[in-house]
């Protein structure tokens, strides 16, 4: 038996032991917990009051961190470019090629790609950093814990993109960008005409036109809800699997039993969903931008 | 109808029938939204990956191109699950 296998068996044994101990009730059991409200984990209480709706809260903190990260890391790496790249530079160059060739150039012609690549690339990197820092526990929770007499906020997973307003603003930005680009290319009337596929005439054209206008508005909704719901559901299921359910139901054993699922889901979210959602958002923005100037689809 | 209400109030441990019905409706909303959404998205994701395997075995030289389209399709299909889930959650928390 190899060492890795021994360690693995040991870990599974300890886990099973804890599950059994938990379910026997030695660690104590509580009735259903009415005080713990899962939706409070996603609440955004105001930290600094500013006039109007401009309060600073945790979502704003996450936005600022990810914006700074996007700018600083990329500018820093760009300034230190070398002919013989190190590992970080190679990774960023791969990312750059992905953004430029796959996302932007794959969906629009070269002249437009040159113009819109900075927008699409920034969108991708910003959402990506936003999703990734959402999986690092930061002391931003609404409730506090006491450590050696010091009141510090509890560590929490939270992402600004798990709040509908952030993806909605990004989606509206994309909507305005591609509508403006389409109007600039076709003219206001020509843009509305270009919504109707070529070769459709008469009453059918009016019907298709209404459908196309509706689908254009639905794009804002689907673009924002896709990102928002993915991040919210991801954070929620991690919360429930790694402790939340055990606390609500007051069963210690359940917490131990579900912990591996929570870990697996965490890895799935970090490894796949965070990157994939940023990629999808950028790709769809590029497709919409490219489609708005296409002659007729 | 009365027996149904009794069963519901037993499950949800509430006295008021109207509140019981409301709690039951919310539970049904989350269940149908999340559950049926998961069914549809699961079938769709299965079809996508099945087709990807099929086409890569037919044309292995197209692998890179297929992989990038595959993730696009996967994310678009997966999102349909979240539309159902979000409408269920809206019913649960806001209705």
Image (spheres, grey):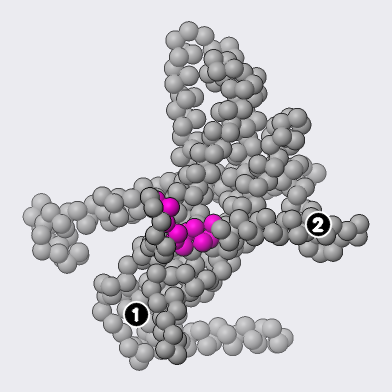
Give the numbered dot on residue A251: 1
Relative vertical location of residue A172 with respect to residue A22 in this rendering, above or below: above
Which range of residues does the magenta coloring cover? A53-63
Q: Is residue A57 magenta?
A: yes
Q: Position of residue A167 (x, y in %)?
A: 50, 47
Q: Are marks 2 and 1 in contact (CB under 8 Å)?
A: no
**Which chain contains the residue that carries disc 2?**
A
Q: Secondary structure at mark 1?
A: loop
Relative vertical location of residue A43 with respect to residue A96 in this rendering, above or below: below
* Quadrant including the C terminus of chain A: top right
Give the numbered dot on residue A79: 2
- Could one spot residue A275 in this view of the protein? no
Relative vertical location of residue A241 with respect to residue A206 in this rendering, above or below: below
Q: Position of residue B2 (x, y in %)?
A: 8, 55
Q: Secondary structure at mark 2?
A: helix
Circle 2 residues within 10 Å: few <14, some 14–19, many ≥20: few
Residue B55 lies in what quarter of the image? Answer: top right
- Could one spot residue A278 in this view of the protein? yes
Q: Give the Cα separation between the discs numbered 2 and 1.
A: 54 Å
Residue A10 lies in what quarter of the image? Answer: bottom right
Q: Position of residue A192 (x, y in %)?
A: 53, 18
Q: Which residue appears at 17% of the width and 54% of the height?
A: B21
Q: Is residue B64 magenta?
A: no
Q: Which residue appears at 42% of the width and 89% of the height?
A: A149
Seen in the image, is A155 located left or right of residue A101?
Answer: left
Q: Position of residue B7 (x, y in %)?
A: 15, 61
């Amino acid at each position: 038996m190899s060492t890795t296998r021994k360690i693995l068996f040991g870990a599974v044994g300890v886990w099973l032991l804890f599950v059994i101990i938990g379910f026997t009730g030695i660690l104590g059991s509580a009735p259903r917990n009415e005080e713990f409200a899962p939706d409070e984990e996603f609440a955004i209480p105001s930290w600094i009051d500013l006039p109007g709706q401009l309060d600073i809260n945790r979502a704003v903190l996450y936005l600022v961190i990810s914006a700074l990260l996007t700018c600083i890391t990329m500018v820093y790496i760009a300034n230190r470019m070398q002919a013989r790249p190190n590992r970080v530079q190679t990774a960023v160059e791969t990312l750059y090629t992905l953004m430029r060739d796959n996302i932007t150039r794959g969906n629009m012609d070269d002249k437009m790609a040159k113009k819109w690549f900075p927008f699409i690339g920034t969108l991708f990197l910003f959402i990506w950093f936003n999703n990734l820092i959402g999986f690092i526990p930061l002391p931003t929770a609404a409730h506090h814990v006491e450590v050696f007499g010091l009141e510090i906020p509890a560590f929490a997973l939270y992402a600004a993109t798990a709040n509908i307003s952030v993806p909605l603003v990004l989606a509206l930005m994309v909507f305005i960008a591609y509508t403006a680009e389409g109007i600039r290319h076709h003219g206001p009337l020509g843009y509305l005409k270009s919504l109707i596929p070529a070769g459709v005439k008469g009453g059918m054209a009016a019907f298709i036109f209404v459908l196309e206008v509706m689908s254009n508005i639905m794009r804002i909704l689907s673009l924002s809800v896709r990102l928002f719901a993915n991040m919210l559901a991801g954070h929620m299921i991690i919360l429930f699997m790694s402790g939340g359910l055990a606390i609500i139901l007051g069963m210690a054993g359940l917490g131990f039993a579900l912990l591996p699922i929570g870990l697996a889901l965490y890895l799935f979210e970090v490894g796949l969903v965070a990157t994939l959602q940023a990629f999808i958002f950028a790709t769809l923005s590029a497709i919409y931008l490219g489609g708005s100037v296409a002659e007729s689809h | 109808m009365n027996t149904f209400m009794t069963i519901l109030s037993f499950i949800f441990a509430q006295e008021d029938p109207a509140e019981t019905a409301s709690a039951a409706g919310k539970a049904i909303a989350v269940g149908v939204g999340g559950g049926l959404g998961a069914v549809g998205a699961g079938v769709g994701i299965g079809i996508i990956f099945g087709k990807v395997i099929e086409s890569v075995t037919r044309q292995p030289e197209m692998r890179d191109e297929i992989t990038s389209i595959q993730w696009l399709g996967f994310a678009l299909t997966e999102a349909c699950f979240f539309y159902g889930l979000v409408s269920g959650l809206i019913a649960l928390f806001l209705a």
